Amino acid sequence: MSEIEKKLSKLGKKKVIKSGGIRRKAKVVNSIKPTRLSDEEKQLVNLYQKINRFLKQETKYQDLIKVYIDNWFVDMVSHLRKKDFKEKTIDLKTLNEDEDFKSNFFSISPCENNIFKSNYRDLNNIFSKKGYNYYINQLDRLLSDLEKEDYIPKEKPLENIENIGVYYEKLGLEKGEIPTLAELKKKFLKLSSKYHPDKHPDELEKYTKLFQEIDEAYNIVKRYHYKSDKDHLYK
């Protein structure tokens, strides 16, 4: 029996007291009956619990697991479409940067009783049937990747390891840091905006070169940590 099932099974039980040598069941005011989970709820809580075990592991790969999950979220949200939501006015452009949306609807954490059921209801209130199925499939894909240890980086060509520090420096990244795709893109956009030749018409040649160097550094660091534009997970 899982932890959530143990806790649910204890809800609504009456307390036994002993009075005058006689064992009696005390009346429980507003006793809570065990909450039954639907098959869809069981599927969701099962995925949450299994993924959460990876987040709780104390291994040398803990930081990589967190980065991997962050990148999974970026990739998953980037493929959502308006038809995946019940409310058609959702601004998909800012969705990926909305921390409230992320924490409310995509929190990978232990789910218990009313907290879990509230999360499940929220998902069904915001997603269409197609969108909910997509989310479940993506959670299942994430779990499969974690079980296969896809978060562990594969070996890189020696020349990339020797030169990567130069490109890290150009982007203002800390040595040994593993940036998420969102963090990497944020760095690139900030620097490319700062050094864009259009902003420096009097020093066009100088800033064209700087702009090109930033662009090169961004693409090299991205390829170093991520296979390709189509592969948005740590490989």
Image: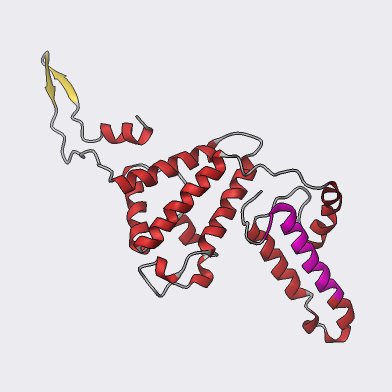
| Relative to 161, 59 lies left or right | left
State which quadrant residue 221 falls in: bottom right
User: Which residue: 83% across, 86% down?
Assistant: 201
Q: How many marks?
A: 0
Q: Colour scheme of this structure image?
A: secondary structure
Q: Quadrant of the N terminus?
A: top left
* Above or below: residue 198 compared with residue 146: below
* Pick the front one: 89 or 195: 89
Asked if the stretch drawn in magenta spans residue 217, the answer is: yes
* Above or below: residue 206 compared with residue 124: below
Q: Is residue 95 visible?
A: yes
Asked if the stretch drawn in magenta spans residue 142, the answer is: no
Please provide percent x and percent y for residue 56. 53, 37
User: Which residue: 63% across, 44% down?
Assistant: 151
Please provide percent x and percent y for residue 31. 18, 38
User: Which residue: 47% across, 61% down?
Assistant: 100
Magenta span: helix, strand or loop, mainly?
A: helix
Q: Is residue 110 visible?
A: no
| Relative to 169, 149 lies left or right | left
Please provide percent x and percent y for residue 121. 32, 55
The residue range painted magenta reads: 209-228
